[in-house]
Amino acid sequence: MTPMIDVVFELIIFFVVTLTEAQRKDETIELEDGKHGIVLTPEELPPSHMQIDIASRDRNGKYLPRGRISMGDREISPAEIGRRVKERMQKYGEFPVLIRADYDCQHEAVARVMNACTENGIWKISFMAVQEDKTSKPGRPGRKHLARLKKKAD
Amino acid sequence: MDMTPMIDVVFELIIFFVVTIQQEDTFSKLNANRPAPSNGSAESSNDITVTIEVGRGLDANGTLVYNGTRVRRPDLDANLREIAKTSKKTPIVIRCASNSPHKALVDVLDICYKNQLFSVSIFTM
């Protein structure tokens, strides 16, 4: 009996951990569709990769022209990103940078993040997009619906 | 040993997880290069340039300019398909207005990827 209980506990812990892991990101970001991109699987993201989130709005829904840049769950300045990129460059060499930017944010915000990377030697940048939209089902607002709502709010 | 209660519990757990687990979107990534600041403005003549503009009287979603004329997204797709027929290695330069929405950039990148043009660089105006 004991090995079986061990396995069941292992499974429970696995699910709890993966669920909390998935929640550790900025939920206000809505991504644009990119059906033809490289499908993101965990293997496509080595542990050394760096993900930078750029939201177009603050948590109350107010539009921010300069964007709200964060890593993990902490807001961060482009200068701080530059420092981190430099540090990691010295440790691992070149590493992939993935930008998860809201469809609505201005290019300027994205450019500031890209510049922070290029100034420290990272020239290849990846952008995250939605390959297949499974969550915009009836009863739950999808991207297009949200866009209309935001337009009304402005 | 009686296994029945245990199997009941395991089934219960499986049902719980199946019901509570949320289906997530699948994501993709689109790679691009950033040109070096020194040669950023000096484009070689065989580059294909797509410009994203935003301005008075233009589409707020970003107006695409290709070959000096405004194009809609399907037109750009058709143009890039022709280019991909000649050479898939053709470098594409996307020039973005700093006030253009990020979605326009992703749209253009997606069109490039659709036509298997992977040598894309992004230049900020």
Image: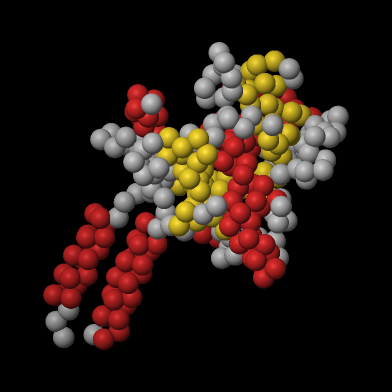
Number of labelled discs?
Answer: 0
- Would you place residue A56 above or below residue B56 in this image? below
Front in this rendered view, residue A30 or A15:
A30
Left or right placement of residue A2 versus residue A57 in this view:
left
The quadrant of the image that shows the N terminus of chain A is bottom left
| Quadrant hosting residue A43 | bottom right
For this view, does A129 lie left or right of residue A84? left
On the question of residue A46 being in view, the answer is yes
Image point (67%, 70%), residue name = A91
Quarter of the image for the C terminus of chain A: give it: top left
Q: Measuring 61% from the left and 62% from the top, which residue is drawn there?
A: A84
Q: Position of residue A144 (x, y in %)?
A: 39, 29
Q: Name the spot of residue B47 as percent of width and height, x first.
A: 80, 32
Report whether A93 appears left or right of A55: right
Quarter-wise, where is residue B1 in the image?
Answer: bottom left
Q: In terms of depth relative to the viewer, which is nearer, A105 or B64? A: A105
Can you see residue B31? no
Query: In this picture, is A115 found above or below B40?
Result: below
For the point 70% across and 21% down, the residue is B66
Q: Position of residue A32 (x, y in %)?
A: 49, 36
Among all residues in the image, which is located at the extreme right?
Answer: B45
A22 w.r.t. B96: above or below: below
* Residue drawn at 63 percent across, 24 percent down: B53
Colour setup of the view: secondary structure
* Most foreground residue, A76 or B31: A76
Q: Vertical placement of A150 versus B11: above or below?
A: above
> As drawn, which residue projects farthest toward the top?
B57
